[in-house]
Amino acid sequence: MNLLRIVLTSLRQHLFSSGLAAMSIALGVALLLAVTSLREQAHRQFTQVGLGVDAVLGPKGSPLQIALNALYHLEEMPGRIAWTYYQAVKANPMVADGFAFITGHSYAGYRVNAVESRFLTDFEYLPGHRFSVAAADGGSGRLFSGKDEAVAGAEVARALGLQLGQTFNPTCGVTAGDPVHVNDHIAFVGILAPTGTPHDRAIYIPLESFYTLEGHGASVAAMVKDLDHREISGAYLKLQRIRGDAYNPGVTELQYDINQSTKAQLVMPAEVMPRLFLIIGWVDQVLWAVGMMVALLAAAFLAFALVATLRERRRDLALLRALGARRRTIFGLVLAQALAISLAGAVIGWLLGHLLTGIGCHFVKAETGMSFTTWYWSSADFGLLPAALVLGTLAGLWPAIQAYRLGLLATLKPQS
Amino acid sequence: MHHLSCAALLLGLLASPANAEEATHGHIAVHGGCLNEIGGCENGHAEVKIEGTRLRMWLVGGGNNTTTAMRVPDASIALAITIGTGQPPRTLVLAAKPLILAEETIGACSYFEANADWLAGVAALKATGSVQFNGKKADLVIEWPHGFDPDHDVPAATPAAK
């Protein structure tokens, strides 16, 4: 009987305790893997992807609040900026393009944003990717062309079961109980193809439609034509970030100039969003700590399970010794058993971890519109398997040493 | 992970050029220039940068407010510039260039600049002048590229020409 068969037979004989030890290791690995994967994906999405926006021109207020409102359809914009100021910024040579928007309306829990029509045709949410309503891309209908028309993001359309031609009354606000524009019936004429970004979680109406919604008052209605007094919530900006092959220092000067004004500020998502992780970073640290605790407890449980198994198998191991097996063979047998349990736990944990990530992705998409992937390869994918094996080895050392020290005569002595 | 971040920060700090810290005296120089105190560190600074033949100067706040523009009523600022030992000072008049997006105007302006061919290739200079800063006439001393910080600087001789 070779070493592997002895290990497998022993595992089979103690299936319940071995299985429990493997499952506890699997739980620790799964938790650590899911937390790491979601954290790394979130960090990447929030800080690197940038959703096609180099900068957000917004009113004075919290930069984080502005970034969350403009890019992730969360929070509220702290004020408005003048259209004329936006035009002055857009005329700056550092600005490659700009797209004005107005936030502050909603429908069925989803934001209704008024945007320049160019936003839906010219804006690249990812390099080389523009919005589409083409059926081949997964969209339907057409882009808006009239005042009482809207297009819905893919996630909104899916969640609300929207049909082309269906109408809605926008709510003047983003919280429950805010007044509804009951006399403004806006029809969905298009559904955007999925982008995998928070843009999927908004409904878009023409910028001019916002000013003419009933109840906004004559002064706001006049902003359709009176550009000198027109106000917007902000604008997405594309900047000339690179000059030659290097970062363009003009971007810093543009941000400095705008931030000195009393009217507006330039928010760089890449600068602001990492602050969010500083604020909420403790959450994943707590989850990580819980995962580590589970893994350590699993290792302790494995050690105790092996010691208990050893007690039952003392005579078997002594017999093996009597048949010529060396002390180090016995040591290796117990250690191999620990490694086998750890390996099984790590593999099950890896699968379970990705399953947990998949469930997490579903909730993240529902809450933020961001597409995370179940099979994202995080640093945990590469590190946890060897870590679990090392932990298993350490856990197996104590029972292995006990087995190594097993006295042959004392163990085989007949028991009365 | 935390240790890695600390290590990266440490490496970053170690890798920073020593003169960057010297030129900003621990403050933030938004435009990458050197900071020169105006009437004390807490009162304000002139951030100075030379790009080819252009000398640029931003008047900014004191203490930790070096990212905030300080507007002054001066339409121009005359500087007496010494480049090398024994060289006679040259006069350079910086004109107010209002930052349009900051809603500045001449008379309430924080940015000044001037062009002079002889600035090209200058390795170091010392300049003196005056400015109406925080409602009072203040002496302006500029030491480029290290910055003027009388509280921390060791008195140095007039910079040598390149």
Image: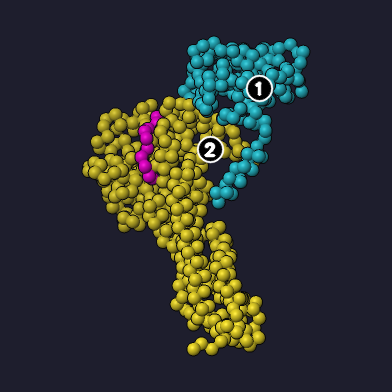
Chain colours: A yellow, B cyan
> Could you say which is closer to the camera, residue A146 or residue A317?
A317
Front label number (2 vs 1): 1
Gap in angstroms between the C-alphas marked 2 and 1: 39 Å
Q: Is residue A233 above or below residue B25?
A: below
In the image, the segment drawn in magenta is A73-84
Name the mark on residue B153: 1
- The residue at which mark 2 appears reads as A239
Residue positioned 46% across, 26% down in the render: A261
Residue positioned 39% across, 31% down in the render: A81
Residue positioned 51% across, 87% down in the render: A415
On whether disc 2 and disc 1 are found on a single subunit, the reply is no
Residue A253 in the image, given as x and y percentages of width and height = 55, 30
Amino acid type at image mark 1: Asp
Residue A43 in the image, given as x and y percentages of width and height = 50, 50
* Quadrant (top left, top right, bottom left, bottom right) of the C terminus of chain B: top right
**Subunit bearing disc 1:** B
Residue B54 in the image, given as x and y percentages of width and height = 65, 22
Q: Are there few (<14), some (14-19), or many (20+) residues within 10 Å of tag 1?
A: few
Asked where in the image residue A411 lies, by quadrant, the reply is bottom right
